[in-house]
Image (cartoon, rainbow, N blue to C red):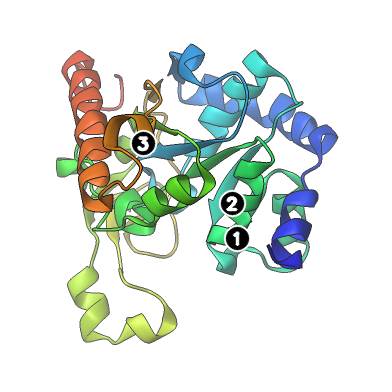
Amino acid sequence: MSNGADKDVAKWDPGFTRAITDRVGPIIKRYFRAEVRDLHAVPSAGGALVVSNHSGGMLTPDVLVFAPAFYKKFGYDRPVYTLGHDAIFVGPVGDWLRRAGVIEANRENAAKALRDGALVLVFPGGDYDSYRPTFTENVIDFNGRTGYIRTAIEAGVPIVPIVSIGAQETQLFLARGDSIARRLGLKRLRAEILPISIGFPFGLSVFFPPNLPLPAKIVTRVLEPIDIAEEFGDDPDVEQVDLHVRAVMQEALDELARERRFPVLG
């Protein structure tokens, strides 16, 4: 394990995290009328890879909905690390993020945290998922990414799927703009999409400026852990495991969608 992974994980500050959670958590919960269901499904000890769909575009509330609920139930002895793109770790903001448990998204960091007994929250679909069109909001789509499965296998930890609904209604996401991004050659800048949305206060937005999120009701549900070795053997097929994880998540997301009566209102 590299020293970089050790340093990234070691920067988590439970006191700082508690302060952020105590201040921001209630605001997020009230604004989005947020619910986190079935937290009892999270293993009470040991590392676990928490795998979630990603929603809400640039101002995604996913972590700020889940993490405060987790810490309220389990306390601050066990961190929740969130894997984030290295582009967000700029200047003092990067230090604050690391202190709050956001670490650079690579296998070394994830493996170190998991072996230390932490939860690691990963959004395999990344920006591709968080900018999915509102009209297809209830679809689990990781864009073919399966690295999370290999991470769980190598660390020997269960996968804990969670699904969330509501954040794609915080504005009207029209298109990812991936074909436009390809034509403009943005891939060389590590940008695979150029999302188009409509919201408040800027109206039409082509990635920037980001509109403020509407107060859509957000419901997050934790699903039963998946023990890969127990269900798929000692030499699991990565594609098969990924298909199973996404199928379980899709079924749960469909159930949440059937409960939802009105957009935004919930």
Identify the image quadrant of residue 180: bottom left
Front-lying residue, 33 or 42: 42
Identify the image quadrant of residue 29: top right
- Separation of residues labelled 1 and 2 (CA atoms): 5 Å
Front-lying residue, 5 or 256: 5
Furthest-front residue in this view: 234
Question: Residue type at mark 2?
Answer: Ala
Q: Secondary structure at mark 2?
A: helix
| Residue linked to disc 1 | 108
Q: Secondary structure at mark 1?
A: helix
Residue at point 77% right, 47% down? 99
Where does the image place residue 236, in percent across and percent down from the top left?
29, 46
- Separation of residues labelled 3 and 1 (CA atoms): 20 Å
Residue at point 53% right, 62% down? 85
Q: Secondary structure at mark 3?
A: helix
Q: Give the answer, above or below, for where 30 lies relative to 117.
A: above
| Residue linked to disc 2 | 111
- Kindly indicate whether the residue at mark 2 contacts the one at mark 1 (C-beta within 8 angstroms): yes
Residue 134 badge: none
Where does the image place residue 27, in percent across and percent down from the top left?
61, 26
Q: Nearer the viewer, mark 3 or mark 1?
A: 3
Where does the image place residue 172, in percent across and percent down from the top left?
26, 45
Q: Is residue 261 visible?
A: yes
Tell me if mark 2 has few (under 14), some (14-19) or many (20+) residues whose alpha carbon lies within 10 angstroms of its own: many
| Residue linked to disc 3 | 228
Indicate the quadrant containing the C terminus: top left, top right, bottom left or bottom right. top left
- Separation of residues labelled 2 and 3 (CA atoms): 16 Å
Question: Residue type at mark 3?
Answer: Ile
Question: Residue type at mark 1?
Answer: Glu
